Amino acid sequence: MYNPKLETFLRVADAGSFNKAAELSYISPTAVIKQINLLEEDLGVKLFERTHRGLKLTKAGISLYHDAKYVIQYCQDSVIRAKNAMQEDVNVIRIGTSPMTPAKILVDLWPKIHDLCPEIKFQLVPFENTPENAREILKNLGQNIDVVAGIFDDTMLNLRNCAGFEISRQPLCCAVSIHHRLADKNRLSVPDLYGENLMLMHRGWSHYVDQLRDDIWQNYSQINIVDFDFYCVEVFNRCENSNDILMAVQAWENVHPLLKVIPVEWDHSIPYGLLHSTAPSETVRRFLLAIQTVLR
C-alpha cells in the first residue's frame, strides 16, 4: 500500500546511521544505503546530509519523515478497518480508541448497557491521534468507526461535522511532570501556577478553553500562556520534557506515565462524552439511548 523503502528511511532517520538501521532491518548496510539512494532518486530530493558525525535529515527529509509516519500508520489502520468490515454486524458498535480518546468510560458502563441491549456488541478500533486522522475519522463517523469518546463543544462539532452525546463535565485540570515542583500536590490553587508556562490549545478550538484563557489574561497575568495546535502524544512528551504545564482532563491520566493530572481550584470544565455521526444508525441510536437510561 506504500513504498516499503519508507520504512527503511524511517529506521535510518531514527537510528542516525546506516549500520544501526541495517541491524534493525536484518539486512546489510549496503542494502540499506541502496534503498535510500533509490528512494532519493525516485523522489528527486536529497533526504540526508552525510557528514563525518553521521547522518542528518535535510529539510526535505524532515518533511518526508513526518508524512511517512502518517502514511504508514494510516495504511496499517486501513487494514484493520478493512478486516473489521469483513466481520460487519448490524449490532456491533465500533469504538475508535487512541491515547487521547480512551474507551475506559464505555468499558465501565458496558455491563449496564449490556443488560438493556444484550444484542449489541462493541469492537475497539485503534487509531493514531494525528490531525489528519482526527479530521477524517470524525467527518466520516458511521463508516469505519461509529463513536469516539472525548472532550468536545459546539465549535468543534460544527468544525468536524459530527454530533456529541454528553456523558459528564470534566473539570479542566493541569498535567505536570512527576519531577515538577507541583507534582507533590493533589490539588492546585491558581496562585500555584504563577510564573509557570501553561500550554493551551489555540483560540477558536474550544469555547470552554477560550473562557479559561480569557479568565487568565484578565485576572492572572502572572501565568504565561503557551499556544499549541493539536493534542497528541508529542504534546504530552513536550510537557514532560520542557517542564511546562499542560491543560488536561482526568480521562487522560494514563496517556503519559511521567505526567500527573492534577485538579485546579477554578470553575472551568468541558463536556466529555461520545462523538458520533449526525445521522447515526439505528444500532447507534439504541446504544446512545441505553447510555442515557444508565446515566439517569
Image (tube, rainbow, N blue to C red):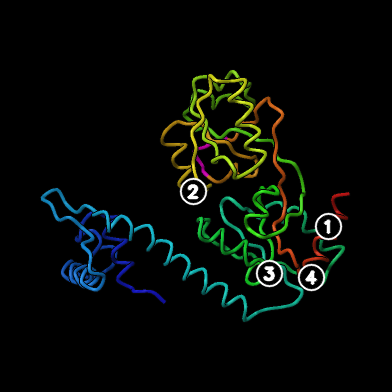
Residue at label 1? Answer: 112
Marks 4 and 1, how far apart at CA: 16 Å
Residue 283: numbered disc: 4
Q: Which residues are magenta?
A: 256-260
Residue 142: numbered disc: 3
The residue lying toward the viewer, choosing from 256 and 204, is 204
The residue under the point 55% across, 72% down is 80
Q: Nearer the viewer, mark 4 or mark 1?
A: 4
Left/right of residue 150 with respect to residue 255 in the rendered view? right
Residue 107, position in %: x, y?
71, 56
Label 3 or label 1, whichever comes before in sequence order:
1
Q: Nearer the viewer, mark 4 or mark 3?
A: 3
Label 3 or label 2, whichever comes before in sequence order:
3
Label 1 or label 2, whichever comes before in sequence order:
1
Looking at the rendered structure, the secondary structure element under dot 2 is helix
> Is the residue 119 above or below the residue 66 in the image?
below
Residue 225, position in %: x, y?
51, 30
Label 4 or label 1, whichever comes before in sequence order:
1
Residue at label 2? Answer: 233
Q: Do the residues bearing badges 3 and 1 touch, measured as CB atoms within 8 Å?
A: no
Residue 270, position in %: x, y?
70, 41
- Please rate how many residues cluster around mark 1, counting C-alpha atoms within 10 Å: few if below 14, some from 14 to 19, many from 20: some
Label 4 or label 3, whichever comes before in sequence order:
3
